[in-house]
Amino acid sequence: MAWSFRKRIKVIPGVHLNFSKSGITTSIGVKGANMTFGKSGTYLNTSVPVLGINNRQKLSGFDRNPEPEIYNPQSITELPDNIFSTDIEEITSQNMQGIKEAIILAHKQRKELKNDLLKIQVSINTSKLKLSFSYVLLYGLIKKKISENIKVDIKTQKEAIKQTKDQIENCFVRLDIDFEPEIREKYNNLLEAFKKLITSQKIWDVTSAHYQDRVATRSSASTIVNKKNVTFSLKSIPDIKSDFDALYFQNANGADLYFYPNFIIMYSNNLNFAIIGLDEIILNQRYVRFTETGAIPKDSKIIDRTWAKVNKNGTPDKRFKGNYQIPVVRYGEISLKTNTGLNEEYEFSNYEFTEEFGKAFREYQTIIKSLKQLS
């Protein structure tokens, strides 16, 4: 009896985004072929699927000194104790549900294919063992049809392994993006600003912030923050392949953020993630006066000095022996929010790069919002 293995594989729908002066169009779904492994080899059946860090914690204090003439930051008393986003199951934008389903399909199918590959590899090892035994026990030499059938099975299994590996390599959501030149220029500006931002010597995720009584603590800092070192880079989630890498924001206390040209993916794992339209993001960028008790990053600027114990008027409190000066540095800060529950805050040692990124993001987002209205 010849070896056979049948597995029908759906073609993963691709996502095509088109950014033009007439608006943004999103199409999901591709024509393709279902893959079937049969006893005589591997065949293609036509079909048309349709789918609508270990971080060092640091506790320190700072004075927020926003620029109200440019931004509209929340007041200190409105800052929550903990800064984290709502459960990501509740955040996905309705019009992004189709993309999410395609990503989930890609993950599930790749997992199934890997399981299939393991089964085929076990089968081919068994067939090879049978072939060896047939020669050792001589019946393979006497009844040549037995060994010939086993060889046919091995050949079929090898082909099935090759086809399965090819399918695994191609089991992802293909994200294709077309920009009109004017819009592409704005996106390139955002990308270049991000590349500068990630060169900041220090990037922190602010995980909590709360008000402190400056008079009672004799401190110049009105807010105490808890923050962790994180990494920003260019990379994409495993289930998406595109010519455009995402702007990656590591999240110390929740799902990481991946910024694509028209949406953000909050990603915990292959099946637990949210997709948010870029137009929904509320980004505030400002600077903070940070009372730095630790090492000062090389790309940060000291803008003032204070005392470990200080009077309300800024003079040193002479009641404390060994009172010493502390530098006040200027850091950049970016907060990201949505009405559906996204709530993240980051600090950067390089304020200038933070400001440049904030400006580039707002300019690009303005175009996205205007195109969204036209669509």
Image (spheres, helix red, strand yellow):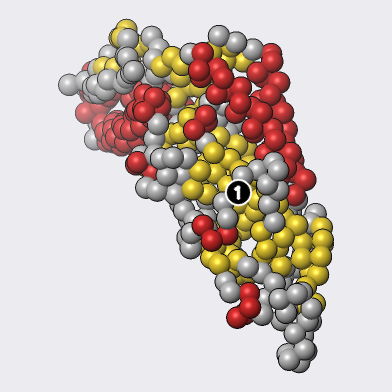
Is residue 30 visible in the rendered structure shown here? yes
Hey, which quadrant is residue 57 in on the image? bottom right
Residue 298 seen from this side: no
Which quadrant would residue 76 be assigned to in this image?
bottom right
Between residues 343 and 255, which one lies in front from this camera angle?
A: 343
Q: Is residue 250 left or right of residue 128?
A: right
Of 197 and 142, which appears nearest the observer? 197
Q: Position of residue 241 (x, y in %)?
A: 52, 27
**Image location (x, y in percent) of residue 83:** 49, 56
Name the residue type under label 1: Pro
Q: Name above or below for residue 74 compared with residue 315.
A: above
> Label 1 neighbourhood size at 10 Å, few (<14), some (14-19), many (20+)?
some
> Which residue in the protein does label 1 denote?
73
Q: Is residue 215 above or below residue 72?
A: below
What residue lies at 78% left-to-right and 81% top-to-bottom? Answer: 316
130 to 332, vertically: above or below? above
Front one among 242 and 207: 207
Residue depicted at 67% across the width and 76% down the height: 219
Figure quadrant of the N terminus? top left
Q: Is residue 129 left or right of residue 25?
A: left
Residue 174 image point, x, y percent: 48, 21
Return the x and y of residue 34 as percentages of the image width and height. Answer: 32, 14
Give SS at disc 1.
Answer: loop
Residue positioned most to the front: 313
